[in-house]
Amino acid sequence: MASEQAEHQSSTASQGVLSELMLRQETTLLAVIVAVGIVATLRNPAFLNPANLTDIARAAVIYFVMGCGASLLMIGGGLDFSVGAVFTLGGIICAWLLVWGAPWPLAVLAGVAAGAAVGYVNSVIIERLHVPPIIATLGTFFIVGGLCVQFTGGEDIVPLPETFQALGQGAVLGVPYIVLYAIALGLLFWFLLEQTPFGVETRALGGNRKAAIANGLKVNRLDTILYVTAGATAGLAGVIYAARVGSGQVAAGGPSVTLSVVTAVLIGGISLLGGLGTITGVAVGALLLSAIDNALIVASVPPQYNSIIIGAILICAVAVDHMRRERLYKRRR
Amino acid sequence: MAIAQPDIPAPALEMRGVGKSFGNVKALSNVDITAGVAEIHAIVGDNGAGKSTTLKIMCGIFRPDQGQLRLGGKSVEIRDASAAHHLGISVVHQDLALVECLDIATNMALGAIPRRGRFRLDRRRMETEAAKVLDDLKIRVGSVRTQIGLLSGGERQIVAIARAVRMDLPIMLLDEPTAALGVRETAHVGEILGELRQQGKAVICISHDMDFVFRNSDSITVMRLGRSVATRRTKDTSRDEIIGLITGAIQGDTASSDPTFA
Ligand SMILES: Nc1ncnc2c1ncn2[C@@H]1O[C@H](COP(=O)(O)OP(=O)(O)OP(=O)(O)O)[C@@H](O)[C@H]1O
Ligand SMILES: [Mg+2]
């Protein structure tokens, strides 16, 4: 029915169709979140407890912070599988410096910088050695993961100073600090993507790399910036996680974190083919993922259902994304 | 060879003895092209004759293996597309080089996006500039916020041409700008090129459309099998001669003087 309506739109209304579709992805996801919430509440009213809702938001923060850099990179046509290991690295580097007595701003910065450095290495491997992104970052995923274990001897890094833990565990008016960090970061990335020439060039790069080159964009420099950014936000998420749990954990990240971030970003409407996507979509995707995680636990559904449901949602979301493109670009040819 | 005379301005763009190979494929050898200021210079030839490759060398997408490129009489090396832009060259590519998921205004601004302050994108200026250029060229494609992906092939072609015109640079290269256009739009593009000539720009245009070439160009270079085989003033030649040169029925000038040919 909706498709029939769209057929009748004249070309001048195409902008309306577009924003409508863009909106629809996010509204659909919000509807799914609400549905998940209703089902979970029916099985266990504790789902709606403020403490539980805060838990959902806290878990979403980690996906979202990592998702900010990862989605920008994907909009620019790249892909980063190393984020799950970089997440661990960021937390460990930060915790290690704190234990050695470094002031927390320095430790935080070092955790983020370590992530950025891995991002830079990724971009060098991809650009200079011409290794496809999926393979290059899978390789650094394993290498960084191994280095983390080597560096810590497999032991978590404790105890972290109270002042640092307070940054990850405190709240104002019931809103956890880390949710505020995520909102600030989200605003920054929204600004970068929607309000700067850099954002436009990133979309152009992901939308049509050849056209970007032909129009004189510095595509290699853009690639580098995007991989560094993806690494930096993964490192930052690791730092935030370390503050939240009060230790630098060797087992914090791993393949499941990489896959969750990529999944959240894809569900949020970022296209693997580049060019399309919004930061609000990533936020909703992250929220959906953590809401499902939480709802299934609260409703005491066996964990395997979690995987099954997320897999199904991922496939649906990407199928919808493909349909969007088809409708947008093929209709008038 | 040619000695620059004070009263004759140096050609806007010259190619001398340019060769280019892709692995084992020799795409170009010994290509000579001279395009004058305030002139429309057509390049014609069969499919695969090397026209697009020649154009891509002119705008820095490929680097020549041999030969040289001169702008205003000075030998230059063009490293990439943004270097070409700085040297005063704008391009309309055969595949148009548009980004489907971005709108008309953004596509027209790519490579030179207007800013407000240091970091911010000036979307309003981007849109008014695009609308003004389209308006000046009497092009109607609806709102400048329309996504390129929604436009027809002909509309895209027109937007790609408008983008190059917006750059307002002294040299403009076009690769088959009328391939997707109807009769009226083709004539319109002819008018646009005529206006550029009047503004003193050098226009180099690849085309398969003989009507278009004979109606609008000042001179024609024929390419065949990766070589430039002849250059004629449009008013001194005929369709039969040009078609003969394209097919090889008529011997070109440079083919015989080419050492590798003997
Ligand atoms: N990037 C490339 N890699 C390998 N070979 C190429 C490349 N670009 C062009 N060629 C080859 O160079 C030759 C000339 O191609 P070119 O695109 O310049 O022809 P053209 O005259 O523009 O043809 P058309 O009229 O079909 O556009 C062809 O044989 C083509 O296969
Ligand atoms: Mg061609």
Image: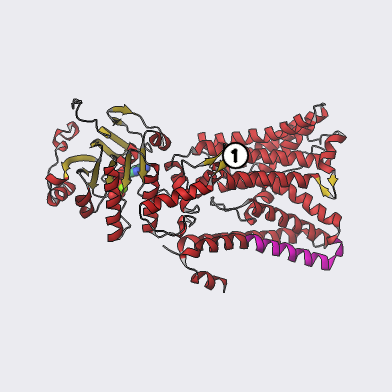
Question: Which element type, helix, strand or loop, lies under badge 1?
Answer: helix
Q: Identify the residue at image location x=14%, y=51%.
A: B239
Q: Is residue A275 left or right of residue B159?
A: right
Quarter of the picture containing the N terminus of chain A is bottom right
Q: Is residue B107 left or right of residue B204?
A: right
Q: Is residue A289 magenta?
A: no
Query: Residue B140 in the image: x percent, y percent?
Result: 39, 58
Residue annotated with mark 1: A227
Badge 1 crowding class, 10 Å Cα cut-off, few under 14, some 14 to 19, many 20 or more, is: many
User: Is B87 in front, or is A319?
Assistant: B87
Q: Identify the residue at image location x=68%, y=41%.
A: A234
Residue A125 visible to the viewer? yes
Q: Is residue A39 magenta?
A: yes
Q: Is residue A272 above or below residue A324?
A: above
Q: Is residue B9 left or right of residue B106?
A: left
Rendered image quadrant of residue B72: top left
Rendered image quadrant of residue A27: bottom right
- Identify the magenta region: A25-46
Q: Identify the residue at image location x=85%, y=35%.
A: A163
Query: Residue A42 in the image: x percent, y percent?
Result: 82, 68
Q: Is residue A182 above or below residue B20?
A: below
- What's the amino acid at mark 1? Tyr
Quarter of the picture containing the C terminus of chain A is bottom left
